[in-house]
Image (cartoon, rainbow, N blue to C red):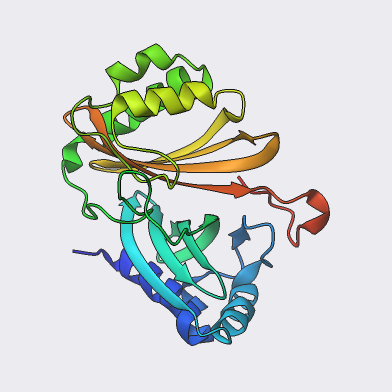
Amino acid sequence: MNSGRKKQICTLLKGIETGDPEAAEVVNEAKYIQHNPLTREGSVGLAELFQRLAKTSPRVEIVRVFEDGDFVFAHTDYDFDVREVGFEVFRFEDDRVVEHWDNLQGKPSHPNPSGHTMLDGPTEATDLEKTEANREMIRRFLEEVLVEGEWARLDAYVDAESYTEHNPEMSDGRESLQATLSANAKGRKYEKVHRLLAEGSFVLSVTEGFLVEAHVSFYDLFHIVDGKIVEHWDTVDHVPPRSEWVNDNGKF
């Protein structure tokens, strides 16, 4: 069952389809901080964006939506003039949105080598009592494995029998994950973990790093069962050069 805040975010995102400026009324314009460097601040900026995007006859599907304290985060399927998969993160004060981050990646027309898309799989959080334990486990995984490159530690965190991978270029299985990460170690570099958001069995990490020397943001969504990662989705988005920003808040 969606909470009131989750429903507000679903309404906000669906406003992209209609171009209805009222969908942005959940945003507190007086306090709003926009972290998409290419979007203007405030609900006026969002209303203008919705109206512009509506001209492309967009489709918005909210596949997953989770809540962590004052944060709501959504996993979305966008069909604008291009197909994209996104993670959207919103921070609330009371019942109004006061801050927003996102991460978008082009959606391929084909599944990955194991037959999975960037969006399929379970959508509902379970094990709500394990939220903090799962958040801490992912923190250790990021720091030890992805930041420090201790690939041998994967077996402590990733399920050996049922690991499912949704990255467009990767395959299922812990051994495949280890081979891919170690082979790409120099080209795919996680440097700084900015945020970990969690609801039960799902944890979203926001990390800054580099992909083939390009400055990027990594958003990784992990599904955890019995203390092990059993499934993973992600998006990688380039951080635009400072000269292209239309606000001063930064990507992170």
Residue under the point 25% across and 52% down: 121
Question: In percent of the image, x 42 and y 77: which residue is there?
Answer: 14
Residue 142 picture location, percent across and down: 44, 26
- Can you name the residue that lies furthest to the right here? 243
Name the residue rendered at 37%, 70% in the picture: 61
- Residue 63 location in percent, x, y? 32, 62
Front-most of residues 30 and 128 = 128
- Which quadrant of the rendered structure holds the N terminus? bottom left
> Which residue is more in the foreground, 206 or 231?
231
Residue 201: horizontal and vertical position, in percent?
23, 41
Q: Above or below — where is 46 with respect to 32? A: below
Residue 20 image point, x, y percent: 50, 87
Residue nearest the viewer, comparing 45 with 169 = 169
Quadrant of res 95: bottom left
Q: Is residue 208 left or right of residue 198?
A: right
Q: In what quadrant of the picture does the C terminus appear?
A: top right
**Quarter-wise, where is residue 81 in the image?**
bottom right
Residue drawn at (58%, 79%) of the image: 53
The number of callouts visible is 0
